Image (cartoon, rainbow, N blue to C red):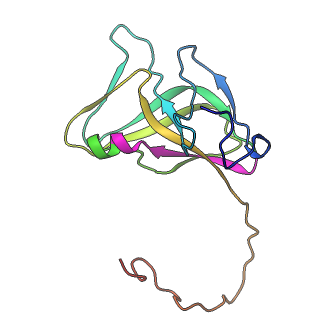
Amino acid sequence: MTSTSPTQSQATRPVVRLKRLDERAVLPKYHSDLAAGLDLSACLPRGDAPEKLTIQPGHIAKVPLGFACAIPPGYEGQVRPRSGLSTKHGITVPNAPGTVDADYRGEMFVALINLGQEPFTIEHEMRIAQLVIAPVAHAIIEETDTLDETNRGSGGFGSTGL
């Protein structure tokens, strides 16, 4: 894989710093030149039994990743499901996309929910989600007595069709 994508120079790419908290952690990485997301891998605690975690149907598990990160100001990390796990097994992120704020410095975790019909077992180092680094803007909030008119108006959920 090349060090820069064809659409973005090295100078314009944000730098995300990673701190390994467990020597067995797999640090996030892109798995293709134009991948939008960095793959996130489970870093399950050591124990007497094999390092596995089973999520029962309808249950949520908080899966440790074994590292902390520093996302630069003006960016966020969006934690998203892996398409294969969600379409084949019903394993997804319940708050998708989950947000990692630029000022968070604790261990990274991924909340996963099993929407499938069968228990699903996560093994140590399994790729379980992806992290997209995206720009964010802090809006200026102004209170007002009136809002500008639009064609849509107050039409809410489903008002623009299916």
Magenta segment includes 74: yes
Residue lying furthest top in this view? 48
**Residue farthest to the right, as pictured:** 11
**Quadrant hosting residue 132:** top right
Q: Is residue 149 shown above or below 21?
A: below
Q: Residue at x 72, y 79 (%)?
A: 143
Q: Quadrant of the N terminus?
A: top right
Q: Position of residue 122 (x, y in %)?
A: 35, 27
Q: Report whether 142 appears left or right of 109.
A: right
Q: Is residue 139 left or right of residue 83?
A: right
Quadrant where the C terminus sits is bottom left
Residue 123 lies left or right of residue 119; in this view the side is: right
Nearest the camera: 73 or 7?
A: 7
Q: Position of residue 91 (x, y in %)?
A: 33, 41
- Tell me which residue sits at (51%, 88%) in the image: 152
Camera-side residue of 145 and 6: 6
What is the count of numbered marks? 0
Range of magenta residues: 73-85
**96 and 39: which one is in front?**
39
Measured as percent of width and height from the top left, residue 21 is found at 61, 20
**Percent position (x, y) of residue 24?**
53, 15
Is residue 75 one of those drawn in magenta? Answer: yes
Q: Is residue 139 above or below residue 98?
A: below
Work out whether 38 lies above or below 143. Answer: above
